[in-house]
Amino acid sequence: MEKKLELVELHKLEGHTDRVWNVSWNPVSSILASCSGDNTVRIWEQTSLSHSWSCKTVLEETHTRTVRSCAWSPSGKLLATASFDGTTAIWENFGDEFECISTLEGHENEVKSVSWNASGSYLATCSRDKSVWIWEVLGGNEYECASVLNGHTQDVKMVQWHPTMDVLFSCSYDNTIKVWWSEDDDGDYQCVQTLDESNKYTLFMFFFICLFLIDRLICAFYSSHSGHSSTVWAISFNAAGDKMVTCSDDLTLKIWETDIAMMHSGEGYAPWTHLCTLSGYHDRTIYSAHWSRDNIIASGAGDDAIRLFVDSNNDSADGPSYNLLLKKEKAHDMDVNSVQWSPSEENRLLASASDDGMVKIWQLATKP
């Protein structure tokens, strides 16, 4: 990792009239979506000549309450938006305009997060009603509920599909992260692991994979005090998919790892184990964490700050560790709700969203 790096504010995107909850980069073009407590979604586009950003369009009049989450499909053609009005809207990009082509209903109350799987064939949503829903993408703008997953005991804050496999993760106000997996292609998803303070396997998990992983089971079943002690707000994966970062109201970020080769081999589920904990870097709730394609972790918190972390590449007797790369105090005037790296590694751009109503574009650059 280069030395003497700084996080440079390139652009400040103004227009939302309430807090901005979430930002999402389009995976195939220079477009950014943001969603807000003002019930709208804004689509921001970068011009090729001046590289400045402007609001291309405002998606409004579909959601009647706060839009909490937004996510682009892998193709970049569809945008899913989740709202406190209990619905998830699907928007299609027709070039000059966006059209709401479908509205997903079923949750009892606020929808908190939405996520597409890697192929774009499934969509996941979660809600304050404590449930996680998996939707199958059908033809003709049709979406069908394939599974309703119950297991969390409190508000579910975020859902996130694994970047290379159809394994779903959810995190909650109940202080846990749950892993949902289907053994075959029938879509029968089960909770195969719950990452909590004791990090013990579910009973289902114990019986399901004991024949395959008895050595791993013993190791993980007796591990203790590795999970979060308060609300878990966000989940993100590295590009390889063998590591995961989570962040929490307990003021920590935690790094987890799995045997990704085993998962891809079809031998069965490979459990996630706690690798290390990053603490003492934020002094208020950490609301967002995102792992870049070149292995830099960004975090945003209620202390108005952004932090960047990298693997130390120096495993000590205590195990692997991550170092603070840099800190950006007062990145926003209020809580930082979302940080997300651009999918392009070329310019190392980071977007952030805040209670101050602003979206900012940052660049990780070498100091002159």
Image: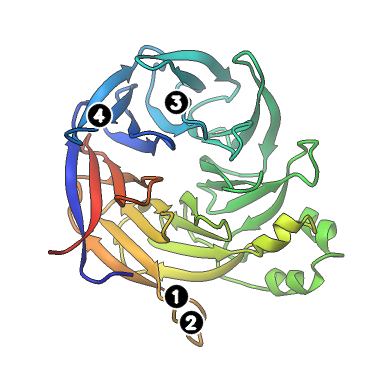
Q: Position of residue 352 (x, y in %)?
A: 29, 44
* Element at label 4: loop
**Which residue: 58% across, 40% down?**
118
**Circle 4 crowding by C-alpha within 10 Å: few under 14, some 14–19, many from 20:** some
Q: Which residue is mark 4?
A: 18
- Pinpoint residue 253: horizontal percent, then vertical percent: 43, 62
Left or right side of 347 for 62? right
Instruction: Measure the alpha-carbon separation of dots 1 and 2.
Output: 6 Å
- Of 267 and 144, which appears nearest the observer? 267
Residue that protrudes farthest toward the left in the picture = 368
Q: Residue at x 51, y 13 (%)?
A: 101
The amino acid type found where label 4 is placed reads: Asp
Relative to 339, does residue 75 appear above or below in the rendering? above
Q: Earlier in the sequence, mark 3 or mark 4?
A: 4
Of callouts 1 and 2, the N-terminal one: 2
Q: Secondary structure at mark 2?
A: loop
Q: Can you identify the residue that label 2 sits on?
A: 315
Question: x%, y% of residue 86?
Answer: 50, 23
Q: Determine whether the residue tagged by mark 1 lies in a helix, strand or loop.
A: loop
Query: Is label 3 in a helix, a strand or a loop?
Result: strand
Which label number is shown at residue 321?
1
* Residue with the mark numbered 3: 83
The quarter of the image holding the N terminus is: bottom left
